[in-house]
Amino acid sequence: MNRRELREQIFLLLFRVEFNQKKDMEEQCRLFFEESDTPVSEKDQKHICSKYEKIAERLPEIDRMINETVRGWSTERMGKVDLTIIRLAVYEIRFDESVPTGVAINEAVELAKKFGQEGSAGFVNGILARFA
């Protein structure tokens, strides 16, 4: 898988956080690959789960950063898709030195175009611009 495809898989797994308890996420990670329509190599599965776990460890910190940065919004008011995309991008911007800030923002906007609602791409871009 290329980086964009990996990022999309990480987003889809991270999205499950909104609907499952933390203690259930190990099983959700396993089910994610069993139920996937896209074949994922064992190497890519390890990468996806590893990055997911790193993000999940920092979710309270990431959410705090988002809430401190945005005006007129909070993580509780954001749509689940947009929030998940923003969380992934904030992690990449602030904690993953292998991803340049511009790439993290551009990829987040592309995810918002694919998975979000009308206007999601602009919303995500506007919030992430504050982190750049």
Image (cartoon, rainbow, N blue to C red):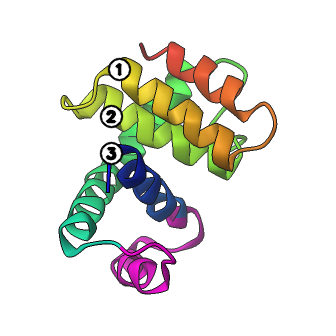
Q: Can you tell which quarter of the image residue 74 is in?
A: top right
Label 1 or label 3, whichever lies nearer to me, is 3
Q: Amino acid at mark 3?
A: Arg
The residue depicted at 51 percent of the width and 13 percent of the height is 130
Main SS, magenta region, reads helix
Q: Residue at x 21, y 67 (%)?
A: 46
Residue type at mark 1: give it.
Thr
Membership of 24 in magenta stretch = yes
Q: CA distance from mark 2 to mark 1?
A: 7 Å
Q: Which residue is mark 2?
A: 92
For image coordinates 72% across by 41% down, the residue present is: 77
Left or right, 54 with respect to 37, comes to left
Q: Which residue is mark 3?
A: 3
Q: How much space separates mark 3 and mark 2, taking CA atoms?
A: 13 Å
Classed neighbour count for the residue bearing mark 1: other residues with Cα under 10 Å, few (<14), some (14–19), many (≥20): many
- Name which residue type carries label 2: Glu
Circle 3 crowding by C-alpha within 10 Å: few under 14, some 14–19, many from 20: few
Residues at discs 2 and 1 in contact (Cβ within 8 Å): no
Residue 50: name its quadrant: bottom left
Residue 115 place in picture, x, y as percent: 66, 49
Q: Is residue 64 above or below residue 85?
A: above
Residue count near mark 2 (Cα–Cα under 10 Å), binned few <14, some 14–19, many ≥20: many
Please state the horizontal and vertical placement of residue 79, each as a whole percent of the image: 71, 46
Q: Residue at x 29, y 22 (%)?
A: 100
On residue 101, which mark appears? 1
Task: Give the percent coordinates (x, y) of residue 89.
Answer: 43, 35
Q: Which mark is residue 24?
A: none
Asked where in the image residue 88 lies, by quadrant, the reply is top left
Q: Is residue 20 left or right of residue 71?
A: left
Q: Which quarter shows the C terminus?
A: top left
